[in-house]
Image (cartoon, helix red, strand yellow):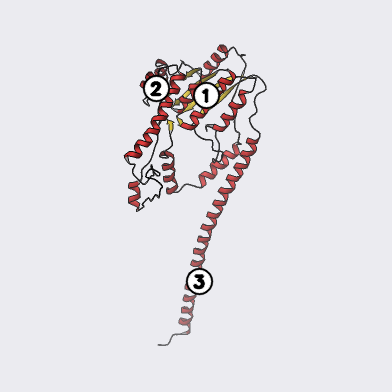
Amino acid sequence: MEASPSMFLEEIAMKAKQIVGIVITGIVIIAVGVTGVLSNVLESQFAAEQTSFLDTLWNEEMEEGIVLPEEDFVGVIDVVGEIGPSSYSDLYYTESTYNHSLYMEYIDMMMYADNNKGIMLYVDSPGGTVYESDELYLKLMEYKEVTGRPVWAYFASEACSGGYYIAMAADRIYANRNCWTGSIGVVISLMNVQGLYEKLGIEEIDITSGANKAMGAAGAELTQEQYDILQSLVDEAYDQFVGIVAEGRAMDEATVRALADGRIYSAKQALETDLIDAIGSYEEEVAAFISEEDLAEDITFYAPEAEVSDIMSLFYYAAEKITPKSDTELATDIIENNGNGVLKYYAE
């Protein structure tokens, strides 16, 4: 049976529709691919530009330096948040971020400022890295030696481990009645993900110059020798902590070691064990500082700030929200932040 002209036309129309459908599908696939690539490129470019933009603004702010008050003042050092190295390249700066380099510079400046009359440490911290805790402590001790001026400390909601360590430079310590303090000790945290690697079919391969070069690697078990090596580092930092507390609180080392098993003390318990001098509010300590150091009642208590505009904080907060982390990035964060093998005076 011969095909009629109408059937022939219908067949051509159907094939044309198929071809058009294929073409449209191809265009959609290409568009999606291009959009994905373009999105990734723009996202990367946006992240790079925002980091560069922040760095520029931050550098402009920091170039101005710290401006000390012209009148007599007591310098306030806010040991707030986890103690560690400053990170000017963080997505955004907040007032609760501990700023190590800012405070080190501030203390140096106060040493040679005749109108500075002392330092008040405001501590609200779980502690942090051994290096920065000790460096700030030593800088405060240098300040006292050079100037002969007083250093007092106030403990807010917590002053644990490295936060307590730094306060050993203080001549007098007040604590809020609800404060937790102490946690005198040292920790190295490592994370072993060997079981996870095995489930995912991943094998860690470390080519090293010695048997202990890669100790603590996330994909390998610690040997007893490696455990002992890390324990020796913890013990040495612990001995240093005990010595600092014994000197700062005028205690013998045996007494300190009995207290320094890592436990946290309430303000009342800390007062009973001579870890602090008094319980009270920040305002009460300020009044006592002024009275006992014979200062003017209206003296300024000045805390420097590395200022970054609020709009920048909002900008980076928004940027972080629209670029969520992948599962891999989240897992990496957990490993790096909870098992990075860094010596810490820190309350877990």
Relative to residue 85, is residue 222 drawn left or right? left
Q: Nearer the viewer, residue 147 or 160?
A: 147
- Pointer 3 residue: 20
Q: Residue at x 49, y 64 (%)?
A: 29
Give the label, 1 or 3, closer to the camera: 1
* Three-letter code, disc 3: Val
The numbered disc on residue 265 is 2
Q: Quadrant of the C terminus?
A: top left
Asked if disc 1 and disc 3 are in contact, CB closer than 8 Å, the reply is no
- Pointer 1 residue: 122
Q: Nearer the viewer, residue 142 or 262?
A: 142
Relative to residue 185, is residue 287 drawn left or right? right
Number of residues whose C-alpha sits closer than 10 Å to that of mark 2, classed few (under 14), some (14–19) or many (20 or more): many
Q: Which numbered disc, 2 or 1, marks the residue that appears first in the sequence? A: 1
Q: CA distance from mark 2 to mark 3?
A: 76 Å
Asked if disc 2 and disc 3 are in contact, CB closer than 8 Å, the reply is no
Q: Residue at x 63, y 40 (%)?
A: 57
Q: Nearer the viewer, residue 327 or 310?
A: 327
